[in-house]
Amino acid sequence: MGAPFSLDPSATAAFAKLEQDVGAQALHDTAAPVKAVVIGGGTGAPVSIRTLLSLEADTSAVVAMADDGGSTGILREEAGVLPPGDIRKCLVAMAADEGDPLTKAFKYRFSFARNHTLGNLMLSALEESTGSFPEAIDICSRLLNARGHVYPSTLDEVRLCAATWNGCKLDGQAKASHSDSTLYRVWLESAAPVRAYEPALDAIREADFIVLGPGSLFTSILPNLLVPGVVDAIRNSHAATLFVCSLADQQGETRGMTALEHYEALCRHGMEGLVDYMLVHSVDSLHPGDGACDRVGLDARSSQIGVHGEEIRPVRISCDDADRIQSRGTVVMVRDLVDPDRPTWHDPIALRNAFRTVLRLSRTQPRFARDREVERRAADMVKVRTRE
């Protein structure tokens, strides 16, 4: 039997390095704080949350409500509550003091109690005692002295369903995330019409900067966009929208997918014309004529790198694929983004520098007045490996 208490994995050490190297430096070229919204879930959204907080952005998160695995799945099925897991991760990311005992305890998992986390149990118990999931979130936010707001994308009970590239249907987020075949499309099913949580829509409409990801594309990011009203809120905002592409496809859902295919999946689920910037990892510079990457289903020999016994399949991008994305109005930024100590995590300093670049570009060219040809020419300067 393992230790009775364990902590959920997080990028605590990496962000401590960020605070040491960067300190409290923030954006000083704006009179008011940037209003930023992270859309996602899982372990990816907290990375963007903490990066934005290091820029002193006024940060909110809109979180998917489709998780049905692990502790969250047990609580949904047996207690009839809304899924607390991804909400809890985002609340902890916003906590004022990472080393505070209550913040640390919120992440504790109990191996002797079906691997539940204290945070999940707190949110579920408070939902039951108050009769309101948003009130439960608000109470936990105050307990952790959270530096922003966390909103569920919906308060309705939803189930995520998926179709794979070879035509199989999968029911449930947990099954979809561990699919044997690459996913092609996802959708929500519910006993009643699904409605968005209005405060989440308000946060999106009022944002200056919207960040999608990083994280699991089909099971953390897209479930938010499937809630009616969310994509319309993005469309009606004045915000610059950034998609942070995953570093690697360790989960079955995006196995073998290139950066272009990640982008196409977003567009297939309502985001066509709404992604202003896309951030992609590459160690190597991109050069014209290097050819397009093999498409999913055609590539049986995807490059793999071994790190500490792990095999990691990086999400690939070529210059041709970057040009294809940019031809659809999205500026592609290619950076070396990997944390050298944790190769499946983004390096917080590199991510922070990339966010700063996007914020500066978006300020000089407001969303609805933007000249796409000018942006594509400007993108030639960022569509290479750079590291500020």
Image (cartoon, grey):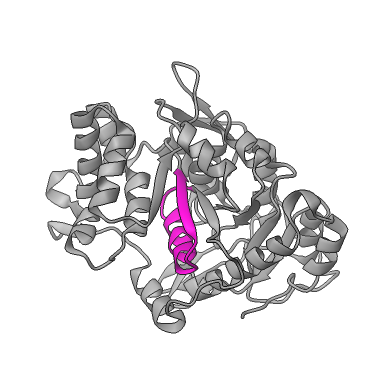
Number of labels in the image equals 0
Residue 226 image offset from top left, x and y in percent = 56, 33
Residue found at the very far top of the displayed protein: 192
Does the magenta segment cover residue 41?
A: yes
Residue under the image location 27 percent in, 38 percent down: 136
Q: Nearer the viewer, residue 114 or 387?
A: 387
Up-down relation of residue 345 to residue 246 (above or below)? below
In the rendered view of the protein, which quadrant contains the C terminus?
bottom right
- Lateral position of residue 158 relative to residue 276, left or right: left
Q: Is residue 206 left or right of residue 92?
A: right
Residue 53 image position (x, y, % from top left): 44, 64
Q: Which residues are magenta?
A: 40-62
Relative image position of residue 46 (x, y in whole percent) = 42, 57
Quadrant in the picture for residue 229: top right
Above or below 126: residue 78: above
Q: Residue at x 26, y 55 (%)?
A: 144
- Picture coordinates of residue 150, whole percent (x, y): 40, 46
The residue at 24%/48% (across/down) is 119
Give the quarter of the figure containing the N terminus: bottom left
Decide whether residue 162 is among the magenta residues: no
In the visual, does 159 lie left or right of 318? left
Residue 181 visible? The answer is no
- Please name whichever residue, 187 or 366, is drawn nearer the observer in this view of the structure: 366
